[in-house]
Amino acid sequence: MIEKVPNSTEVNPHKLIDQFGRQVDYIRLSITDRCDFRCIYCMSEDMTFLPRDEVLSLEECARLVKVFVGLGVSKVRITGGEPLVRKNALWLFKEIGKLKNLNELVLTTNGSQLEKKAHDLKNAGVKRINISLDSLDATRFKNITRTGELDKVLRGIQAAKLAGFNSIKLNTVLMRGFNDDEILPLVNFAIQQAIDISFIEEMPLGDVNHTRESTFVSNADTLKLLQSKHSLISSAETTGGPARYWRVANTQTKIGFISPHSHNFCESCNRVRITCKGELYLCLGQEDKIELMPLLRAHPNDDQPLITAILNSMAVKPKGHDFDLRRAEPSIIRFMSHTGG
Ligand code: SAM
Ligand code: SF4
């Protein structure tokens, strides 16, 4: 049970503590809604992207991150859309990489640009990198991503390994009838490459044209299958999010299971998300948000209004999400590419 702390209306001037006593020390910032892929679980084929002036400039992104780090945030994940298709994104990584009180700058990418950019990202201070990979079969990969090329992503994974990130993790969204027969090959690939892999249950976000209930693969079933083939050792490691980890015995690989439908992680939720439009979403599965872009633009030389709004937002961070696969309508009509994964 999450207990409400007394005096929840009083805000701590230095840290982000919400009304249930949870400290927010992790932000996920989407720096673009654009992407070179059109993954079937994430976007429609004919996406309309936001006009440029409705998206935070890279300078505004840097300013926001600095403010959050000043409020005790120690981990920043840059995501999208595809963050690496944003022009001059490297400048932002370098700016964030310089922040003294930041422990971890991490990135989620589809891998399509890594062959060219992995080395510079590492030098800019990116510590860890998550690369989405849903299939090892080129035709299937194309079917799922609609426009992606498997070879390019595989070369990106090799470039990331050469660049020497502290950790590389593959992210796989499993869908029945699409890639659920690739669980073992994908794990074997991760073991061979000495990298980690996480399986993500599909979330009911956005407006795609397949029913989530029919493609849903539960992580419990995936774990059972993997336990029948590998010796898995449960790991206590947690990021405060919906992931649970297992080590594959005698390998360097960890397997994560990201189960957003479970409510267990909400109690320890330590994160908020910022969209590329500067909307501060306090929970991935709820609509509660604060608009930060107007504050950034109305007060270009004064961070105080921004700081006050962010501190006050802690009073409305919801207790937990409300996903339900059985609903005909997605719980939240919001694209993952907009909110950031
Ligand atoms: N373009 C980058 C990528 O694909 O890694 C970063 C953004 S993407 C929105 C972040 C993560 O969200 C990816 O791992 C993707 O597979 C995942 N994702 C997108 N839509 C999803 C959905 N409906 N359910 C679960 N995961 C989803
Ligand atoms: Fe692009 Fe990532 Fe969404 Fe795929 S999951 S369409 S790569 S933003």
Image (spheres, grey):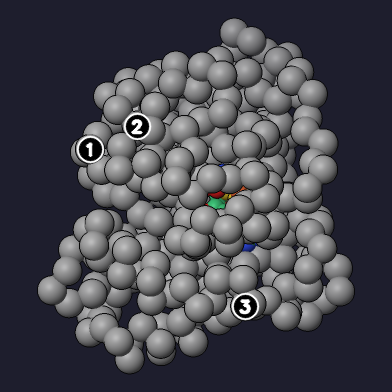
Q: Would residue 167 be seen by someone viewing this image from the given angle?
A: yes
Q: Position of residue 86 (x, y in %)?
A: 57, 25
The vertical placement of 86 against 311, above or below, is: above
Kind of element beneath mark 1: helix
Whether residue 209 is situated above or below residue 222 in the rendered picture: above
Other-residue count near label 3 (Cα within 10 Å), few / some / many at <14 / 14–19 / ≥20: some
Q: Which residue corresponds to the image point at 17% horizontal and 69% vertical from the top-left?
A: 251
Q: Which residue is mark 2?
A: 118
* Element type where label 3 sits in the image: loop
Instruction: Decide which of 74, 72 is in the foreground and name it.
Output: 74
Number of callouts: 3
Residue 123 image-quadrant placement: top left
**Residue reaching furthest to the front:** 139
Residue in the image at 77% along x and 33% along y: 49
Q: Position of residue 104 (x, y in %)?
A: 32, 39
Mark 2 CB near ligand 1 (8 Å cut): no
Q: Indicate if the residue with disc 1 has its beta carbon within 8 Å of ligand 1.
A: no
Residue 283 visible in this rendered orientation of the protein: no
Q: Secondary structure at mark 2?
A: helix
Q: Nearer the viewer, residue 109 or 18?
A: 109
Residue 143: image x %, image y %? 65, 58
Can you name the residue that lies furthest to the top here?
Answer: 301
Which residue, given by chain and number where applicable, does mark 3 sit on? 176
Quarter assignment of residue 82: top right
Mark seen at residue 162: 1
Look at label 2 and name its amino acid.
Answer: Ala
Q: Amino acid at mark 3?
A: Arg
Quarter assignment of residue 201: bottom right
